Image: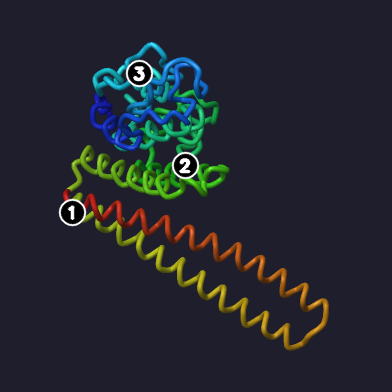
Amino acid sequence: MAKGNMSACLPITLAYEGGFTSDRRDPGNWTGGAVGRGTLKGTKYGIAAASYPNLDISRLTIADVTPIYQRNYWRPLGAEALPAGLDLVTFDYGVNSGTARAAKALQAVVGAATDGVVGGETLKKAAMSDVKRVIQSLCARRLGFLQGLKTWATFRGGWSKRVADVEARGVAMWLAASAHADPKGALSQEAEKADAVSKKQRRTAGGTTALATGGAGSNMAAGGEINWLLIAGIVVVVVAVAGLLVLKARRNRERAAAYQALAKVA
C-alpha cells in the first residue's frame, strides 16, 4: 500500500501547478477574487490568493502547502490507502479537476459504485485490481474529460503532456513498489506499445482520408445534386474520424515519450 507516499507524489503535482505568479489580469491572484478587488498576492504551488487571502503567497514553501493538499485532496481521495502509483494519478487528477470527479473516475475503472466518496469498497477493489491497467485507464478517462472542455484548444498541449507524464510516473511507482525485476525493461515495453499504437493510428487516419478522397472522386464523376450532398457528408465524416485518430496518435506519442524518458533513468 502507499502509506506515506504523499511526499513522493506532491512534488510531481506541484511541478505542474507552477511557481509564483502575480498576473494582475487573473482574478484568482486577488484576495477579493476579482481583478482590482482586495490585494494582489498572486498564486504559488496552485494556492491562489482568492482562496487563501490571509496567506503570504509569495513566501509559501512546500512545507507550508503540504497540509493544505493533504487536507483538501490527499485524504478525501483516500490516497493514503491506494496502491502505489494509483495514489499519484488519482491525487493529480483531483488537484487538476476536482476530488469528486477524480473519485468517480477511480470508482468507475475499479468497478466500485460511483458515488464520489472513496470508501472501503473502492479501496478494496483498487487493492485487488490490475493496478497498471487501472492507472492507464484512469489517465485515459481523465484526458477524455479534459478534451471535452471548452478550454481544451488553449491548454491541450500542457494538459495532454501532464496526463502522459503522470501516467508513466504512476506505472513506475507501481513497478518499484511491486519490486519488479526489470523496471527499465517494463517501462521501455510500455513506450514501445504506445509508439506502435500511435503509428497505427496515424496510418489509419491517412488511409481513411485517401479512401474517402477516392470515393468522393468517383461520385464527382457521376455528377448530380445527390452525389454532391453525399460527397459533403463523406468529407464531414472523414474529417471527424481522421481528426480523432490524429488526436489519439498524438496522445500515444506523448505517452511513449513519457515512458521512454523514465526508462532511461530507471
Position of residue 203 relative to residue 68, above or below, is below
Pointer 2 or 1: first along the chain = 2
Question: What residue is pinned by disc 1?
Answer: 264
> Mark 3 packing: few (<14 Cα in 10 Å), some, or many (20+)?
few
**In the image, is 210 to the left or to the right of 67?**
right
**Element at badge 2?**
helix
Estimate how packed mark 1 is, as few (under 14), some (14 to 19) or many (20 or more) residues with alpha carbons within 10 Å: few
Task: Pick the residue in front: 261 or 127.
Answer: 261
Q: Which residue is drawn at 47% across and 15% down?
A: 38
Left or right, 77 with reference to 7: right
Sequence order check, earlier mark of 1 and 3: 3
Callout in the foreground (3, 2): 3
Residue 254 sits above or below residue 128 on the image:
below
Give the CA separation, mark 2 to mark 1: 26 Å
Q: Which of the numbered marks, if any, corresponds to residue 68?
A: 3
Q: In this view, does 237 lie above or below 261?
A: below
The furthest residue to the bottom: 221
Residue behind mark 2: 142
The answer for how far apart the CA atoms under marks 3 and 2 are is 23 Å
The x, y position of residue 171, in whole percent, is: 30, 44
Closer to the camera in the image, 77 or 234 = 234
1 vs 3, front mark: 3
As shown in the figure, which amino acid type bears the numbered disc 3? Ile
Q: How crowded is mark 2: few (under 14 residues within 10 Å), some or many (20 or more)?
A: many
- Amino acid on which the number 2 mark rests in the picture: Arg
Please tell me whether residue 122 is drawn above or below residue 143 in the rendered image: above
Tell me where residue 95 appears, x and y as whole percent: 41, 30
**How far across and how far down the image is residue 226, in percent?**
82, 76
SS of the residue under disc 1: helix
Tag 3's secondary structure? helix
